[in-house]
Image (cartoon, rainbow, N blue to C red):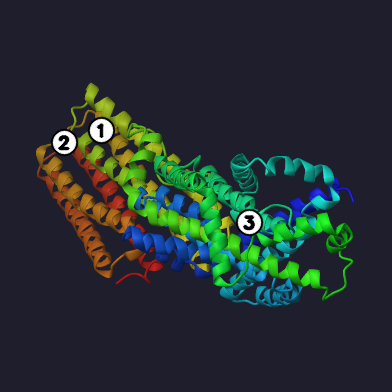
Amino acid sequence: MNYSILDFLGLLGSVGLFLYGMKVMSEGLQKAAGDRMRNILSAMTRNRFTGLLTGCAITALIQSSSASTVMVVSFVNAGLMTLAQSMAVIMGANVGTTFTAWIIALFGFKVNISAFVLPLIGLAVVLLLTNKSKAKSIGEFLIGFSFLFMGLDMISSYVPDLQSNPEMFAYLRQYASLGYRSVLIFTLVGLVLTAIIQSSAATFAITLIMCSKGWITFDLACALVLGSNIGTTITPILASLSGNVAAKRASMGHLLFNLLGTIWCIAVFVPFADFNAWLTEAIGQGDPNSLYKYVTNLEATDPDLYNHLFDGSLPAGHDALRQIAMMQMSVSFGLSLFHTTFNLVNVTIMIWLTNMYVKIVEWIVPSKNRDDEEFSLKFISGGLMNASELNIAQAEKEIAVYADRVGRMINMAQQLIHTKEKSEEFDKLYSRVEKYEEISDRMELEIAHYLNRCAEGRLSNEGKLHIAAMLNIISEIESIADSCMGIGKILNRKIQAGVEFNEEIYSNIDSMYVYIKEAMGMMVDQLHDIENVSGKSLIESYNKEREINNYRNTLRSNNVENINEKHYEYQAGIYYMDIIGDLEKTGDYIINVVDTLRDNFKKRAA
């Protein structure tokens, strides 16, 4: 039987189903967990050891080290953890990914997949048809879980049968008997294969099936698994391309960790592979090298039985089939043990070198100084949309930066009031306020676009409410920027009218600015810790809003008396009240943000 293009497309489809199953399973878990997932991930910032355990646990849950490291890159990009903390989580993810290997090894051959996949899909469909969001998310998880193992079963059917394709067998044999060079070649093959399909678990599944059928030796299968550890870094690298410098450093740290680990393992590869073979046998799972020896010996001594063994014509219960099944389990156990042992040893060594990794990646990926007034989003970008629920945290951090930038406009507007009119300094400062207002408009649009993209992903109900709240917040912050620009326009009209302010007006405006800046500072602090807004801080904001309104009313009443008593001209009073009114509106926009925080984050409000 020749291996046709249709067979190859079937293999690609099987791998695709396997990967899609992991994706759906991961998204279902994220959606079911919602904010709890983000709270769990926040715990990884404590120290390197809790980070290691968290990375291991999360990867074991979502069944994909690529997905978990993309999340880590996203969190570094969002400023939720430092580069050093992210390295510990990435190291843990490499250990957690071996959990998938054990599932494949223990269930891929021992369990009749068709016996439980279809019932699981049936249960999942029932859950998907319910009205409860969490039940639907669990249904998505079960669908993904079923697709994963269905894909594994189909991979077994579509992987090319080397015995039926002698030209392919001869091609591989040419590189399988080169001694130590074969190890390097198959490590490279594992790297490239994983980089293409973007899943070390899929590479492991293919390797396991090939080795279990006696196509390659156990040590070369170990080399393939070793190469997949480097290949799996391609996903977070791709995800970080449009991220900030911190995100690029995190993905580079992941690559460096796996690359250095592979280098030391290759240096001691033969004794290390032999150790795992011995350990497998010592545990009582048999010698993983025996399968290849048995099959090749069978081909040489009894070609007829060899051919019947792989064309499925042997009767059930045949002695050869029983022996093959026992040795298949030995190989699957041995590969899982190699994968786990390698990552455990690697983490044990590398966890103490975290600070060295940080210095190296900072040298490899240097930071670029950017002008403060250049438009750029600090935390969010178009390339990190793999986990919508988790990307909400990035938007939260970006909104806090947005508020900081608009807060600087309040100081600029106040400074503009005291700057000499018709001077070069006034023109420069006015242009700066104008530039900041344009940046504010663009930031609002970019953040809103990002939030809308998040909303298109798989989100919990709480996540959807948070996105709606954040869209409202950025609209109010943009209105604050408009008010600052409005001050500049009022001053321009005042200059054109030839009106002068006296010291009393300047003093009252400065007093109003004191209230506004205090209110703005409270709001910015709340946005920087948006998920832990306290009841006390909300009360302080409301009290400050009342002070702003009361002071505005006092100034408005005094303005009439001051004009009557000739403290200043009537026209000066008009522009003076326009500025006070604009500042009072700024206070309203600030309290609107506070209202949104109270209404949508009250679960975490004290």
Q: Are marks 1 and 2 in contact (CB under 8 Å)?
A: yes
Task: Identify which amino acid the numbered label 3 is placed on.
Answer: Phe
* Left or right placement of residue 505 versus residue 588 in this view: left
Residue sitting at x 70%, y 70%: 326
Q: Could you tell me residue 603's position as x and y percent?
A: 38, 72
Q: Residues within 10 Å of mark 2 (few under 14, many from 20)?
A: some
> Which residue, given by chain and number where applicable, does mark 3 sit on?
204
Label 1 vs label 2: CA separation? 9 Å
> Which residue, given by chain and number where applicable, does mark 2 sit on?
501
Q: Residue furthest front?
A: 301
* Left or right placement of residue 472 versus residue 559 in this view: right
- Considering only vertical position in the picture, is 283 above or below 500? below
> Which residue, given by chain and number where applicable, does mark 1 sit on?
494
Task: Identify which amino acid the numbered label 2 is placed on.
Answer: Phe
Label 3 vs label 2: CA separation? 77 Å
Q: Could you tell me residue 561's position as x and y percent?
A: 13, 49
Q: Splitting the image into 4 quarters, where does residue 525 fall?
A: bottom left
Task: Identify which amino acid the numbered label 1 is placed on.
Answer: Lys
The earlier-in-sequence mark between 3 and 1 is 3
* Left or right placement of residue 162 versus residue 34 in this view: right
